[in-house]
Image (tube, coloured by chain):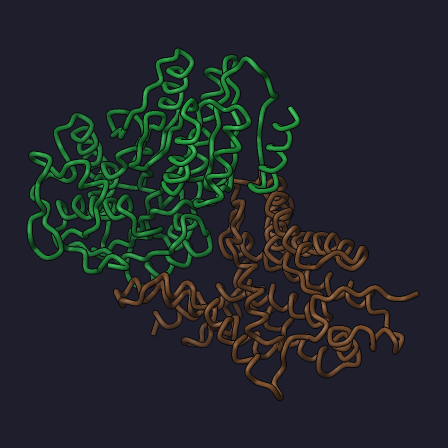
Chain colours: A green, B brown
Amino acid sequence: MKRALFAAAAALFMAGCINSSAWAADKLKVGFIYLGPVGDLGWTYQHEQARQALVKELGDKIETTFLENVPEGPDAERAIEQLVRAGNKLVFTTSFGYMDPTLKVAKKYPNVHFEHCSGYKRDKNMSTYSARWYQGRYIQGQIAAKMSKAGVLGYIGSFPIPEVVSGINATMLGAQTINPNIKVKIIWVNSWFDPGKEADAAKALLDQGADVIMQHTDSPAAMQVSGERGKLAFGQDSEMIKFGPKAQLTSILDTWAPYYIERVKAELAGSWKSEDVWGGLESKMFEMAPYTNMPDDVKKMAEDTQAAITAGKLHPFKCPVVAQDGKDVECKGGDHLDDGQILGMNFYVKGIDDKIPGK
Amino acid sequence: MELVEAIILSVLAASTPLLLAATGELVTERSGVLNLGVEGMMIVGAACGFGGAWLSGSIIIGALCGVVAGILMSLIFALMALGLAVNQVATGLALTILGIGLSGLIGARFVGERIAPAPHLNIPGLTDIPLAGRILFGEDGFVYLSIALVFGIWWLLYRTRAGLILRACGDNHISAHALGYPVLRIRLYAVMFGGACAGLAGAYLPLAYTPFFIPGMTAGRGWIALALTVFASWRPARLVVGAYLFGAVTILQLHAQGAGIGIPSQFMSSLPYLATIIVLVLLSRARTGGSTAPAALGTVFVPDR
C-alpha cells in the first residue's frame, strides 16, 4: 500500500494529474497513458470518452487509472512502469511516440499486457491498434474539392510522420477525382497541440487564398478561425461543430470504446492475445461526423464514397498511385498499395506542389 | 498589400501575450528576483480569465480575473522565495507545475464553452485608412495596452526615483538595504506586478486569441517570455523589438511554408531560443557598457534585523 501511494504521489508530481478510483484487490486494473489533457477536445478527449464507456460497461469487474499530459520519450517509460507497479495488468498507451517506451516496459514485465495505439512494434504481450483514418480523409478530399471555390485547400500538419503524410496523400487523391487541378498548401506547426499556433496557421492559409481548411492537429482552433472568417473546415478526432457551426463539413471521430471493451473482456476471460488491429470504416473504430454545411448532392457523394469504402469496393490508395516524380508507385497489395506501404508512407503523390520537410 | 496587412495583424496578435508576460518578468528580474513560474501563472490566468468572462459575459471582468489569478499565483512564489528565502529556481519551476495542474482543475468546467472574442477597435475614419488604419486603430485593446504598459515601465525604471530604487534592489540588495530601502517589500511588489502581467498575458489567449479554453493552451509561451527577457538584456525598448521579432518569426515561418518557400519549419520554430543564446554569448563578450543581468538576480536576501 505504501508503495502504491508513493507511486501515485510520484506520478502526481510528474504528470501533473492522476485519476484513480478506489484501490481494490480483486478487480482487474486497467491503465491508460494520455498524451494531452483529457479536456483537449481532440485526441486525448476521445480516448478518455472510450475509457468512460469502458467503465460504464464493465465497471463492476475492473478499475481504471489514467495519467494525462505524459510527454513522449523517456518520461513515458517511467509513467508506464508506474502503472505496472501500481498493479495494472492491461495498459493502453495512446500515442505513437510511446512505442519504444512501451516495448521496453513490455519486455521487462512479460506478465502484463500492453496495447499501443498507432505504432508498428509488437511483442507477445504487446498489441497495436489503430484506425484507417486515411479512408475518412479520402472522403474529406472529395468534399473539399467540391466545396472549394478557389481550388486551393489548406492543410495544417503536426509532424511529417507517415500517418500524417498518408492523410495528406489520401486527401489529395480524393480531391483529384473531383478536380484534377486542385492545389493544396501545407503548413507544419511541429506540435500536436498548440491552439494559438494552429489558429495562426489557419489564418496564414486563409490569407494565402485557401478556402477549405483541414488539420492533423488536435485543437479546435483552426475550426474556430475558419468559422469566424466565413470559410469551411474539417474537424479532427472529435466533434468540433460547436466551434464552427457554419464551418464544419464533417469530422473524423475516433471511437475507441468498442475496441477497449472487447480487449478488456478478452483479458477478463483470459483469452487476450497479442494482435495487430488496423480498423477501417467497417470496424467502427472511427466514424464520420454528420455531413453538414454542404449541398445535398455533395452530401450524397460523400455518403456513396463512404459506403463504397466500408463495403471494400473502393480503396483510397488504389493503383496506380503516381508519386511526385511522375512514376507509378510499386503496387504491393494487388490492386492497391499494401498496408506496409501506407504505414511507412514517406512520399507525396503527384499534384502536391511541396516537399516533405527534412527530405 | 492585403497579405502584408494580414501578416502584420497576425504578428501583433501573436506577440502581445509574449510582450505582456515578458514586461512583468522584466520588472520582477530588475528587482533581483528570478521567477521561472511565468508559464504556470499564465495558464492559471488563462483558466480564470476565461471563467470570469464566461460567467460574467464581460471581457474586461475576464481580464481582471486573469490579473487577480496571476497575482495570487505570484504571492505563492513570494511567500516561498521572499518570505522563506527558498531557492528561487526551484520555487519557480514548482509554480509552473502547480499552475498547469491547477488550471486544468479550474478550467475543467469551462472546456468546450465558447465566448465572443474581445472586440476590435473601430474608429470611423481612422480604422479605414488603408494599411496603417487597421494596424494602428483596428486591433483589440490588449495589443495597445501591452505597448502602453511597456512604455510606462520604461518611464518608471529610468525616469523615476521608484525605478532607481527598484533597480538598486536588483543590482545590490545589501547596499539598498543599508540605505534603508525595504528590499523585500519592493521585491514583493515587483513579483506581484510580474504575476499580474503573466495573468493578463494568459487571459489574452482565451479572451482574444482563440476564444475558448483548453488545458495547456499556453503551450510554452511563458518560457518564450522568459527567453525574451534575457534576449532584451533586461531593457524595455529591446523587449518591444524582441517580442515583435519573436512573433514575426512564428508567423512568417507559417506563411513561408504556405507559400512553399523551403526553410525547414523545425529550424524556424527554434529561432527564438537560438537568438536568445546568441544574445547571451554577445552579452558575456561585451565587457563594458551595455546592460547585463541585474547583479543580484536570483540571489536570496535575508535582512539582518
Q: Residue at x 16, y 46 (%)?
A: A173
Question: Residue reaching furthest right?
Answer: B305
Q: On the rendered image, what quadrant is the N terminus of chain B found in?
A: bottom left
Foreground residue among A278 and B123: A278
B228 w.r.t. A264: above or below: below
The image quadrant of residue B147 is bottom right
Question: Residue reaching furthest top?
Answer: A269
A327 w.r.t. B249: above or below: above
Q: Position of residue A189 (x, y in %)?
A: 38, 56
Residue B88 at least partly seen: yes
Q: Residue at x 45, y 29 (%)?
A: A49
Q: Position of residue B43 (x, y in %)?
A: 59, 51
Does residue B21 appear to the left or right of A233 in the view shown?
Answer: right
Does residue A7 appear to the left or right of B212 in the view shown?
Answer: right
Q: Residue at x 20, y 56 (%)?
A: A183
Residue B125 at least partly seen: no
The image quadrant of residue B164 is bottom right
Does residue A254 appear to the left or right of A54 in the view shown?
Answer: left
Q: Position of residue A226 (x, y in %)?
A: 37, 52
Question: Residue reaching furthest bottom?
Answer: B288
A165 w.r.t. A90: above or below: below
